[in-house]
Image (cartoon, rainbow, N blue to C red):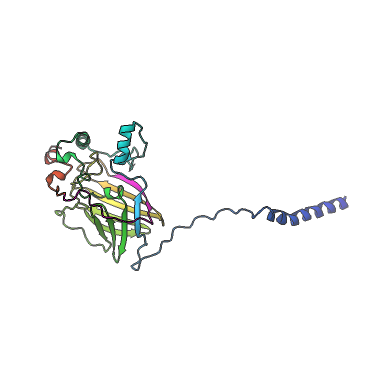
């Protein structure tokens, strides 16, 4: 009995010794992948996460925000009859719809209907008339470039010759009576997230072609969430008690465009249509809400 146990033990030892050699003939043993480490971005001389370069939305276009759609996609749907089921850009409320007040929802439908058959300048989308886009619209249509200087972040678009300088030094907003196309921005870094507080919008532009709009009381908090070297999520929370029943948030995934080359994009040469008719909200509409 003991002899039998001894032979069995020797057989097991021989098998264990020969196992690595057998496996080596079949290739290396696969290892479990290591857990991904948090992205450690390089830093600029003034200590900002270095996120400079060109960025573009994954799903571009400003035909509508619910769903996310471009004018080209809308045209293809109209002539082909096949609807592409893009998601809404709106992540809060959970239903993906802008929480308009009743009067504002009625006006939005009026603007959308006028877009189908325009008879006045204000029926045509402001972007179509080459007017400067607002925040957050500029972050879900064209490619943009980020440049970081000491104490500020600069955004540049080839469209409209537009640029936006966001100071990081904690200075207060300008006076409430000063209204601007892109508003007045103040930024700060929270880890790899750039948080931008934007006020003082003039409300002469819209969120999209079909007439989703806001008022000059809008307050927008933007978050540029840099996930890794090539991925960023843009989020904007809009608070505007004049137009909406509650704050709401949109999200736009962005990707880095390392080989992007910017060219001048002049839209329509000599367009000077920046008068009162450029606003999406007529005086009579806001007075009667």
| Residue located farthest toward the bottom when viewing the structure as drawn | 45
Is residue 269 rendered magenta in the image? Answer: yes
Q: Quick check: 278 left or right of 168?
A: left
How many discs mark residues in the rendered view? 0
Task: Name which quarter of the figure residue 20 lies in.
Answer: bottom right
Query: Residue 198 at x, y = what percent?
Result: 24, 53
Task: Name which quarter of the figure residue 71 lies in.
Answer: top left
Q: Is the stretch drawn in magenta largely helix, strand or loop?
A: loop
Instruction: Identify which residue, 246 or 89, lies in the foreground.
Output: 89
Query: Residue drawn 27% across and 50% down?
Result: 138
Q: Is residue 94 above or below residue 235?
A: above
Q: Does the image show residue 136?
A: no
Q: Is residue 228 above or below residue 68?
A: below
Q: Which residues are magenta?
A: 248-270
Q: Does the image show residue 257?
A: yes
Query: Residue 63 at x, y = what percent?
Result: 28, 40
Is residue 157 rendered magenta in the image? Answer: no
Query: Residue drawn 12% across and 40% down?
Result: 287
Instruction: Identify which residue, 232 or 190, lies in the foreground.
Output: 232
Query: Residue 217 at x, y = what percent?
Result: 19, 48
Task: Name which quarter of the figure residue 153 lies in.
Answer: bottom left
Query: Residue 210 at x, y = what percent?
Result: 24, 38
Q: Quadrant of the C terminus?
A: top left
């Amino acid at each position: 009995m003991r002899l039998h146990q001894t032979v069995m033990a020797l057989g097991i030892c021989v098998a264990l010794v020969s196992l690595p050699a057998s496996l080596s003939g079949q290739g290396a043993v696969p290892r479990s992948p290591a857990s991904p480490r948090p992205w450690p971005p390089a830093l600029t001389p003034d200590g900002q996460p270095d996120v400079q370069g060109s960025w573009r939305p994954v799903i571009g276009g400003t035909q509508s925000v619910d769903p996310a759609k471009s004018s080209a996609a809308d045209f293809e749907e109209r002539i082909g009859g096949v609807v592409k089921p893009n998601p809404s850009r709106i992540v809060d409320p959970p239903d993906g719809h802008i929480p308009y007040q009743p009067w504002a929802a009625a006006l939005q439908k009026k603007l959308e209907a006028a877009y189908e058959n325009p008879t006045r300048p204000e029926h045509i989308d402001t972007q179509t008339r080459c007017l400067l886009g607002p925040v957050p619209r500029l972050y879900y249509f064209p490619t943009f470039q980020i440049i970081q200087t000491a104490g500020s972040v600069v955004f540049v678009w080839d469209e409209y010759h537009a640029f936006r300088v966001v100071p990081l030094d904690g200075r207060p907003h300008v006076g409430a009576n000063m209204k601007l196309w892109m508003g007045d921005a103040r930024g700060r870094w929270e880890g790899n997230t750039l948080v931008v507080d934007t006020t003082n919008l003039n409300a002469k532009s819209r969120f999209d072609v079909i007439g989703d709009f806001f008022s000059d009381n809008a307050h927008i908090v933007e978050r540029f969430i840099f996930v890794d070297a090539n991925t960023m999520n843009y989020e904007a929370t809009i608070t505007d008690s004049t137009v909406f029943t509650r704050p709401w948030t949109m999200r736009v995934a962005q990707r880095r465009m390392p080989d992007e080359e910017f060219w001048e994009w002049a839209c329509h040469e000599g367009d000077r249509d920046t008068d009162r008719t450029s606003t999406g909200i007529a005086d009579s509409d806001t007075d009667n809400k």
